[in-house]
Amino acid sequence: MAQAKKSSSVKVKVQKFGTALSGMIMPNIGAIIAWGLTAAIFMTPNGWFPNAQINKLVQPMLIYLLPLLIGYTGGRMVDDERGAVIGAIGTLGVIVGTTQPMFLGAMIMGPLSGWCLKTLDNACRDKIKSGFEMIYNNFSLGILGMILAIFAYFIINPVMMWGSHWASVGVDAIIRVHLLPLANIIIEPAKVLFLNNAIGNGILVPLGIQQASEVGKSVLFLMESNPGPGLGILLAFMFFGKGSSKSSAPGAAIIEFFGGVHEIYFPYVLMKPSLIIAAICGGVTGTALFTTLNGGLKAAASPGSILAILLVSAKGSYLGNIVGVLGAAIVSFIVAAIILKNDKGDGADLAAKQKEMESMKAESKGTKMPSEQSAHDSVTSYKDIKKVIFACDAGMGSSAMGASLLRDKFKKAGINIPVTNTAVRNLKDEPGLLVVTQEELADRARQKTPDAMHIAVGNFLSNPKYDAIVANFKALTQVQDKPKSTEKKPANGSLEGIDFSKVKEVDFIRHDQHIGSATMATNLFENAMKKAGKKTPVKAIRINELDDDPSHLVIVTPAAKKNLAVRYSDIQIVVVDDLLKDKKLKEIIDKLS
């Protein structure tokens, strides 16, 4: 037990370290891609369209812009804006006087500079006399920044140059003796255990940038971002899986391969741990093909999508990159298929493994998963909400997809409220804000935005709370802003007041808890309509999918009537005691066209 606890503690420390490195790299991936595309297209003489003038941008971006951005971001993570400024100053001391890209040096000096300034502020700020705050703020940062830049120039710079040189020599040696594919034996399990940030962003991306700056491309960018192994596993579930894992695999495969959200296949591996063998075999195969067929990228592919890989592929490397991804998918598919065909389980525990994955992800961020009873929802009123923000750890990937899903639901429901996504660390407290975040990040989100309203979800990609958000916004609009219809409504569910000449559709309300009864009622009513020769469409739909007009005749039970009346004012409602055999149902059929 003690050994297991110690092992878990080590893993958590590595995960936290990886998260910190990722926090510096991920916000700047766009800048890294900008440098990579500029080099790939305009670099002289090997670009697609060589241009000597535009080529002058490549080296300054690599040597100055990217390390300074990383140092700025690292300092900001520690001490907000003051930390960001001093992080950039300290980083400059590392990069001056060298032609090597000092990414590792920036990842050291950025947070270190921010920490030094924060420590100084904590020690001195309470001692500053009133009226002297500004002079302290400006000169403390300026003087300490100068000292740190000098320290970085004379101490950190030589150490980083020596370390970067030998790291590059080591990588080149491993590639020459064709041992690089063996690294995937570590990388693939690490991805499932959420150690990928430490390996990918902490090691492979900085080394890949250095290699790309020297030879024009790097296979290191492909080792962790290759979507092939995950695609193969999900395809195997499509053909040989069981239960919910089989039915959900096609959608997951599209998201993983084209969207680049690799974590969507992790629960499938956790459900059948032996599938890690398939992931390893696919990863090793992919890297072997990349190196053999001269594959490589000009910059990091983030997210790990086939589209991102094609966009930053180096000239002359498209064949190697495509074959490597497809080869990885084929091998992982074959191995996973063999494992699944011999599996005796029923595939019913996918949801449990998704929950376990969320717990592991929470652990990687140094937080705890809240129980269902201690949900972090704090929504009490929607009337003042002007913006919805999805917040995740990196501000990309899953939060972007969650925002897209809710944005689409808002569009269909006619709700005109902006929905965006960001990283938790970048949240700003502002009026009229609704923050949707993962349960394990809810406490951090509340600390950053104490005046906002919060909703915590277990999974950004699929959550019933989105429907509840839509329903509440729609109800608010219709109850507060829309004038009530003056038409006479039927009392107590009678058919008096129902204008059957306007009815163009009969609806039964489908609830997640009672989906079976609503579906059965719809089928029975539809069959009775056909026997009576009536052609009015009959549907089972969710409450927030209704159009508020009298062409909809909605049949509900007394328990559902109140919820329906709050949201809609113009639809026509008939209340029945039993959706399956109430006598009013036959009367309705007789009056419909």
Image: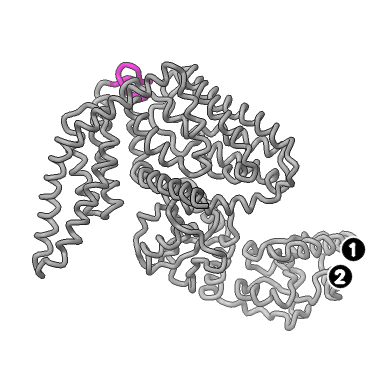
Relative to 551, say whether 139 is above or below. above
The magenta stretch spans which residues? 39-51
Amino acid type, label 2: Asp
- The residue identified by callout 1 is 532
Quadrant containing the C terminus is bottom right
**Most common SS among magenta residues:** loop
Amino acid type, label 1: Ala
Disc 2, SS: helix
Residue 164 position within the rendered picture, expressed as x and y whole percent measured from the top left: 28, 28
At 65% from the left edge and 30% from the top edge, which residue is drawn? 335
Distance, label 2 to label 1, CA atoms, is 8 Å
10 Å crowding of disc 2: few (<14), some (14-19), many (20+):
few
Residue 533 position within the rendered picture, expressed as x and y whole percent measured from the top left: 88, 60
Q: Residue furthest front?
A: 2
Relative to 455, say whether 259 is above or below. above
Taking depth in this image into account, of 385 and 487 the one nearest to the observer is 385
- State whether residue 504 appears in this view: no
Query: Could you say which disc has been placed on residue 268 in the image?
Result: none
Disc 1, SS: loop
